[in-house]
Image: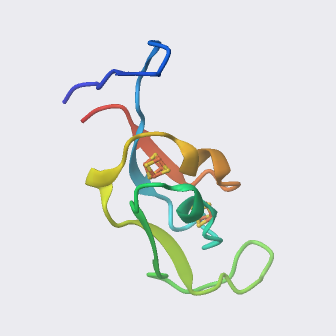
Amino acid sequence: MQQTTCYTRGGSAWIPNYIESIDVEKCLGCGRCYKVCSRTVLELIEKPFEGEDEYGDDMGNKVMSVANPDDCIGCGACAKICTKKCHLHTAMV
Ligand code: SF4
Ligand code: SF4
């Protein structure tokens, strides 16, 4: 396991943070992270559980999943757009 160092166009170093997992218990299935990901890493799937959220509302039937982790470039856009902070990232490859 090691870190990858990338460089901006201007030559500044930055460390990519690759997607590791999504917390399906927090995910709303809103699809925002899917829309901002440029690498087809994420996919909406059927929720692996049923239930109600803390307000007693039906939690819907979809959650986001990491379908193609090897295509992630570690940009962090998915985590930035998520209001529920569902994404776990790692700098290690
Ligand atoms: S943005 Fe967050 S809450 Fe919405 S689908 Fe993605 S992980 Fe789930
Ligand atoms: S870190 Fe970037 S490339 Fe990876 S899943 Fe999130 S939005 Fe897609």
Residue 1 placed where, x, y %? 19, 30
* Residue found at the far front of this picture: 9
Residue 78 placed where, x, y %? 55, 51
* Residue found at the far left of this picture: 1
Q: In this view, does 7 lie above or below 66?
A: above
Q: In which quarter of the image is the C terminus?
A: top left
Q: Residue at x 33, y 21 (%)?
A: 5
Residue 19 placed where, x, y %? 40, 48
Q: In this view, does 67 lie above or below 91?
A: below
**In the rendered image, which quarter is residue 17 located in?**
top left
Of 87 and 12, which appears nearest the observer? 12
Residue 91 placed where, x, y %? 36, 31
> How many dots with numbers?
0
Of 40 and 30, which appears nearest the observer? 40
- In the rendered structure, the answer to whether residue 72 lies left or right of residue 75 reads left
Q: Which colour scheme is used?
A: rainbow
Q: Is residue 69 above or below residue 65?
A: above
Q: Is residue 69 above or below residue 59?
A: above
Q: Residue at x 68, y 82 (%)?
A: 52
* Residue found at the far right of this picture: 55
Of 93 and 55, which appears nearest the observer? 93
Q: Residue at x 40, y 32 (%)?
A: 16
